[in-house]
């Protein structure tokens, strides 16, 4: 199945040069955690995940055509 992934903030370092997002091919039944592993992100780099406009957790199963947004932790003071 194919999903579209958009990365924000510091997570954009995982994008190929010149790309705005990723299109990923995953096995049926893959979860957000599986997607993160495929991108090879470190644990703790992601603060939030949205699928098609709804906040979800890493256990959420993906379906063909999902638009997944990954957000880094927010800093400030």
Image: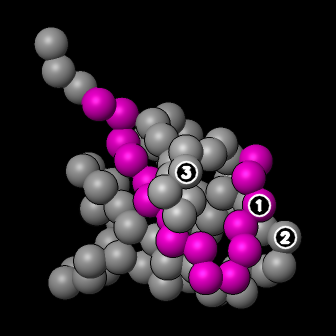
Quadrant in the rendering for residue 18: bottom left
Q: Which residue is mark 1?
A: 61
Q: Position of residue 13 (x, y in %)?
A: 28, 62
Residue at the image position 77 percent from the left and 68 percent from the top? 30
The span shown in magenta is 59-74
Query: Few, some or many C-alpha atoms within 10 Å of disc 3 (few <14, some 14-19, many ≥20)?
Result: few
Residue drawn at 63 percent across, 65 percent down: 35
Prevailing SS of the magenta stretch:
loop
Quadrant holding the C terminus: top left
Q: Which mark is residue 54?
A: 3
The reply to whether dot 1 and dot 3 touch (C-beta < 8 Å) is: no
In the image, residue 14 lies at what x, y percent? 36, 66
Q: Mark 3 vs mark 2: which is more N-terminal?
A: 2
Mark number for residue 29? 2
Which element type, helix, strand or loop, lies under badge 2?
Answer: loop
Mark 2, Cα crowd under 10 Å, few <14 / some 14-19 / many 20+, is few
């Amino acid at each position: 199945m194919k999903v579209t992934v958009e990365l924000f903030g510091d997570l954009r370092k995982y994008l190929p040069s010149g790309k705005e997002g990723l299109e990923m091919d995953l096995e049926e039944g893959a979860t957000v955690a599986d997607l993160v592993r495929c991108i090879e992100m470190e644990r703790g780099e992601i603060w939030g995940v949205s699928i098609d406009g709804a906040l979800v957790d890493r256990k959420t199963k993906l379906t063909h055509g999902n638009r997944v947004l990954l957000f880094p932790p927010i800093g400030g003071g």
